[in-house]
Amino acid sequence: MKDTDKNDAAKDRYDLIVLGAGSAGFSAAITAADAGKRVALVGYGTIGGTCVNVGCVPSKAMIRAAEAVHGARAAKRFPGLSGHAQVDDWQTLVQSKDDLVATLRRQKYADLLPEYEGVDYIDAGPARLIEGGVTVGERTLKAPKTIIATGGRPVLPSIEGIEEIGALDSTSLLELQVLPKSLIFVGAGYIGAELAQMMSRMGVKVTLVARSHLLPGAEPEVSAALTEVFEAEGITLLTGLSYDHVRRDSADVTLRVIQDGNPIDVTADHLVSTAGRRANTEDMGLEEIGVETNARGSIVVGDDMQTSVPGIYAAGDVTDRDQFVYMAAYGAKLAAKNAALGGDHRYDNAAMPWVVFSDPQVAGVGLSEAQARDAGLEVKTSIVPLGQVPRALAARDTRGLIKLVADRKTDRLLGGQIIAPEGSDTIQTLVMALKFGMTTKALGETIFPYLTTVEGLKLAAQTFDMDVAKLSCCAG
């Protein structure tokens, strides 16, 4: 063997190969590199992955912009005030979003690579798994362990004609150069809810359609409260239906749905599909090498993040685990510690918070009432409308509620959900309560600052045993 061949072979040998350079991929690579391991970080799509490029960052930036528009109009809830705001230049707003994405992609991903000498970033074409490593373009990379973190993508629902109409998804919606007059959203999960309300507040006529109801994963009381908010803002909700077909006539799209046996036609400028995502697992050699996937193409992993093939791990949206960026990074860190550092860490989502950035925000942690009952637990619940929370009264915004679920026998908190303007920040206190096994009595006896939304958790805990409507301010 020539010396150059030996050098090339040594160059392409690593302690760990990571496929995918998004949040999960970077988390895994950095974890291993910090421990002195040599890592090949193989690009898949745009560096930074879903969250910074087409997910969390751009959508939340646009949602905040829409909240600014709505907030000006909402000033009228205070006597003596009025306000107005509108979209003056949609293209400028979209460009500012793109500029933010480019900045964060550079600062949080591309510019980080030189900081880690042990990480080689390789973006030489599609990667394919082989025994003992991967092929990337004309290169063959070898390592004893591999982590797959190639993420996921939006998929279209099964509706006749949808492939021909030029349907938008959560990515292409935010790339439109002209603000549409009307939109149909198919799918009422957290992505559909967030984007439908955002576009409605931008002045677009929005119809949201779904087979079940708004936020089907939330508590029914929470879903009902957000439905009331959406309807009050002028969003049309059509739920509990089936899809017939969709067609495009000249400039318009018409979706026919069947509700209670009756056909209903909905027409708009565009149809936006927010009805689901699929793992990026095609053409990677998974089947040939024996990596198990489920019906949706997601990689099946154990609590140690290892796949069905020893030495091959997976993390993030490509797996059958929780589809949140922070859980992707968490799972990838565990995978790296187990794969490259000989650890035995286990995935634990018992106290995992989740947030829907609607307005009011929806957030939850732990078990819902239905989940707790399905688990065979004897439960008790508490619901406090925001009208009982002083912060909401002072802000003149009582949209929402707090619901807690607890074990009737032990009084231990099992979970809870919040719909409130500051719900995303409030939920973390309940996360800590669950993580450390607090009871409703202990939470109800905890001191909270007055005139905060999080004080509502204390009131909800006290509601298990008393009528908080009969308490004076701070009397609890």
Image (tube, helix red, strand yellow):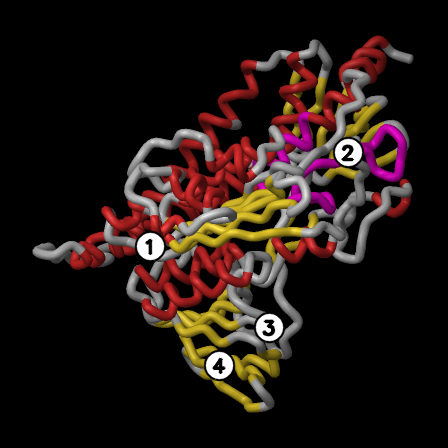
Looking at the image, do the residues carrying marks 3 and 4 touch, with CB atoms under 8 Å apart?
Answer: no
**How far is the residue under mark 1 from the one under mark 3?**
31 Å
Who comes first in sequence, dot 2 or dot 3? 3
Say which of 348 and 267 sits in front.
Answer: 348
Left or right of 299, for residue 431:
left
Q: Report, in whole angstroms, how far the alpha carbon at label 1 lies from the one at label 2.
A: 44 Å
What is the C-alpha distance between the residues marked 3 and 4?
A: 17 Å
Q: CA distance from mark 4 to mark 1?
A: 40 Å
Q: Is residue 6 rendered to the left or right of residue 162? A: right
Which amino acid type is shown beneath numbered disc 4? Answer: Thr
Q: Is residue 175 left or right of residue 211?
A: left
Q: Is residue 38 left or right of residue 71?
A: right
The local secondary structure at tag 1 comes to helix
Residues packed near mark 2 inside 10 Å, few (<14), some (14 to 19) or many (20 plus): many
Q: Secondary structure at mark 2?
A: loop
**Residue located 54% across and 31% down the image:** 432
The residue singled out by tag 4 in the image is 254
Asked whether the residues under the numbered discs 1 and 3 touch, taking CB atoms below 8 Å apart as contact, a structural biologist would say no
Tag in front: 1 or 2: 1
Viewer-side label of 1, 3? 1
Residue at 40% x, 58% y is: 176
Query: Tag 2 or tag 1, which sits nearer the N-term?
Result: 2
* Nearest-to-viewer mark from 3 and 4: 3
Q: Nearer the viewer, residue 332 or 396?
A: 396
Q: Which mark is residue 387?
A: 1
Residue 58 can be seen, yes or no: no
Residue at (80%, 22%) from the top-left corner? 344
Q: Which residue is mark 2?
A: 305
Residue ID for mark 3: 211
The stretch of residues the image draws in magenta is 305-333
Q: Compared to 250, does 261 lie above or below?
A: below
Q: Pinpoint residue 164: horizontal percent, then vertical percent.
A: 58, 74
